[in-house]
Image: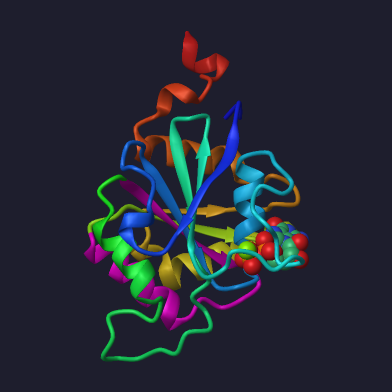
């Protein structure tokens, strides 16, 4: 994906604060420190579009970013610290729940997990809830550069076993090396119906 523009649009909590529903959106979720900001920055080839954990940012709201004027990325607040309650539909909070269940232009939800950590019930629960909303689910297993080649295969199998059935796609990712960036863009462009934005490979043109 060639990035012509990537810019912060707005930050909001309730629906009246969202930008107009005029572009397909992809939302990114994950525990704090999982590598969510780095993953978004890697996708848009910017070092600091989204603030990484070294600088505290707009963490308690939904942050909207426009990419190439054709798709919006939505950085969701980290959900990891919220207390799990069986009576609630999710521990990710009313603000996220409202966005994820009601936003008509939401094309896919990317859940980011750390390749070195065991997936847990909160993550499984989140994916199941997203599926119940009829949303496309992409699981990004990031920080893959911290694993050896053999470990990657093992981790991918393990994550797929724990969470794979809850996701439409599982993508191994590294913000450090760019591993998985092209695959992720293909998945996002397909979900958002903007495949024309992705340059065709030479072998696709024949
Ligand atoms: N080695 C490695 N470190 C990463 C990767 N992604 C993020 N990190 C580091 O993990 C920490 C948290 O990253 P950040 O993107 O701020 O996580 P967030 O809290 O989920 O937004 C930072 O120190 C990053 O440099 C990755 O793919 N590989
Ligand atoms: Mg962050």
The picture places residue 162, in percent across and down from the top left corner, at 44, 73
Indicate whether residue 130 is drawn in magenta: yes
Q: Work out whether residue 181 can be spotted.
A: yes
The picture places residue 32, in percent across and down from the top left corner, at 60, 73
Q: Quadrant of ligand 1?
A: bottom right
- Front-most of residues 51 and 14: 14
Indicate whether residue 188 is drawn in magenta: no
The picture places residue 30, in percent across and down from the top left corner, at 52, 68
Question: In what quadrant of the picture does the N terminus appear?
Answer: top right
- Front-most of residues 204 and 197: 197
What kind of colouring is applied to the model shown?
rainbow
Looking at the image, residue 168 lies above or below residue 129: above
The magenta region covers 106-133
Looking at the image, residue 42 lies above or below residue 110: above
Q: Residue at x 29, y 66 (%)?
A: 98
Q: Residue at x 65, y 64 (%)?
A: 57
Left or right, residue 63 beside residue 154: left
Which quarter of the picture shows residue 154?
bottom right
Left or right, residue 140 beside residue 37: left
Q: Work out whether residue 148 can be spotted.
A: no
- Front-most of residues 53 and 116: 53
Q: Which residue is drawn at 32% across and 56% down?
A: 16
């Amino acid at each position: 994906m060639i990035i012509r523009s990537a810019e912060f649009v707005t930050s909001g909590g309730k629906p009246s604060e969202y930008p107009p529903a005029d572009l397909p959106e992809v939302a990114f979720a994950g525990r704090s420190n999982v590598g969510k900001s780095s993953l978004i920055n890697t996708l848009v080839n910017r070092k600091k579009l989204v603030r990484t954990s070294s600088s505290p940012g707009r963490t308690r709201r939904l942050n909207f970013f426009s990419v190439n004027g054709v798709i919006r990325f939505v950085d969701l607040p980290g959900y990891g610290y919220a207390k799990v309650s069986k009576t609630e539909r999710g521990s990710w909070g009313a603000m996220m729940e409202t966005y994820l269940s009601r936003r008509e232009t939401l094309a896919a939800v990317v859940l980011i997990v750390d390749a070195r950590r065991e997936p847990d019930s909160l993550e499984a629960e989140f994916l199941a809830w997203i599926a119940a909303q009829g949303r496309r689910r992409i699981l990004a297993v990031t920080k893959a550069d911290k694993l050896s080649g053999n470990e990657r295969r093992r981790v991918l199998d393990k994550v797929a076993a724990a969470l794979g059935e809850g996701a439409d796609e599982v993508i191994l990712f590294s913000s450090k090396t760019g591993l998985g960036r092209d695959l992720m863009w293909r998945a996002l462009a397909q979900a958002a119906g903007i495949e024309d934005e992705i340059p065709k490979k030479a072998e696709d043109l024949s």
